[in-house]
Amino acid sequence: MLEKFKIGHYTDTVNKTGVSVFLAEDGATGGCSVRGAAPATRETDLMNPLKSVQLINAVVLSGGSAFGLEAASGVQQYLYERGKGYDAGRYRVPIVVGASVYDLEYGNFGYPDKSAGYTAALNALPSNFERGAVGGAAGATVSKLCGAEAAVKTELGIQTYSMNGLEIAVFSVVNALGDIVDNGKIIAGALAPDGEPVGMKRILTLSSAEPKPSNTTISCILTNARLSKNEANILADLAHDGYAEAISPAHTMFDGDAVFVMASGEKEVEFNMMTALIPTLTAKAVRASVSKDTEHILGHVNPLLYSFFKQAFKHNRRDKR
């Protein structure tokens, strides 16, 4: 499946961070959409349909916040050594785009550097759908308003689709401020002392909580469809509807949400069908970052902190009356 792409990971098990690399060595049509207000990104302007570069060679999803953007340089070196990239004249310049999540407080301070990116590229294989807390998802958590000790650990979320020759795979690193939901019900979130989900949306709307911009959900969508650069950007934008469906709240001022699309161009498709598929597949990839058979809860909300929120909820309701 998706044989034109290679996927590789580097996981730092000591510092709990890593990098995931999605390679199209001979180039793929790229698209990008950044809706989060606190992104850490690289070369996203090149994805604009008005810019001259038409093909990209890699998408890099990493931990380490802005420090982790360094990993993309290792991927660029890997591609340069193999003569891949944009023909700029005397030299070829590999086009490597990417984004990072803030996971610095999950383990020790650490980030994937240039050598980590190079290693992830060396490890890249076709049809590599490895799941778990690997690569860019090594230090990812969600539901973080009540502190890291009450957050929920996530893994690399993957959702695939194949029908009538069309192939799609969505890979999501889910490090959101919000909870993960299904039909409005919280399926992964910080727990109150009584074992019930607290609800990050409830805290934001009914209390004076002051989050930090340390959250982000980033995804890479691979497809064998033949897309224009403009169509790839439209699909990246529509994928954020999947974020809004599966994360509550999504696209806050404290999230750096971004989506990348890579299309290898082998299969002619009806574009409107793609626009209908992508939001649902993205939502499923986000939900797949937590599994029902794994204990993801790191802890309950501190009782004193929860008591503070409860008082804020009551105060807010009195004000509204």
Image (cartoon, rainbow, N blue to C red):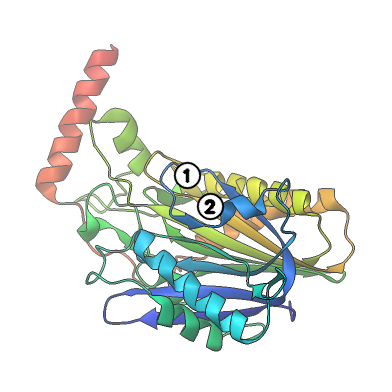
**Disc 2, disc 1: CB below 8 Å?**
yes
Whole-percent x and y of residue 45? 60, 50
- The quarter holding residue 125 reads bottom right
Q: Position of residue 148 (x, y in %)?
A: 23, 58
Q: Specify the quadrant that holds the N terminus.
A: bottom right
Q: What kind of residue is marked 1?
A: Gly
Determine the image quadrant of residue 205: top left
Residue 258 is labelled as: 2
Residue plotted at (36% across, 43% down): 254
Reading the image, the residue beneath label 1 is: 36
Extreme left residue here? 304
In the image, residue 136 sits, relative to residue 235, either above or below, namely below
Which amino acid, by three-letter code, is at mark 2?
Ala
- Furthest-top residue in view? 321
Residue 131 in view: no
Label 2, secondary structure: give it. Answer: strand
Label 2 crowd (10 A; few <14 / some 14-19 / many >=20)? many
Is residue 166 rendered to the left or right of residue 129?
Answer: right
Residue at image x 73%, y 45%? 50
Residue 92: mark in rendering: none
Q: Position of residue 41 (x, y in %)?
A: 48, 56
Q: Position of residue 209 (x, y in %)?
A: 23, 36
Q: Residue at left 63%, top 76%? A: 23
Q: Mark 2 and mark 1: span between their CA atoms?
A: 7 Å
Q: Nearer the viewer, residue 164 or 83?
A: 83
Q: Nearer the viewer, residue 266 or 79?
A: 79
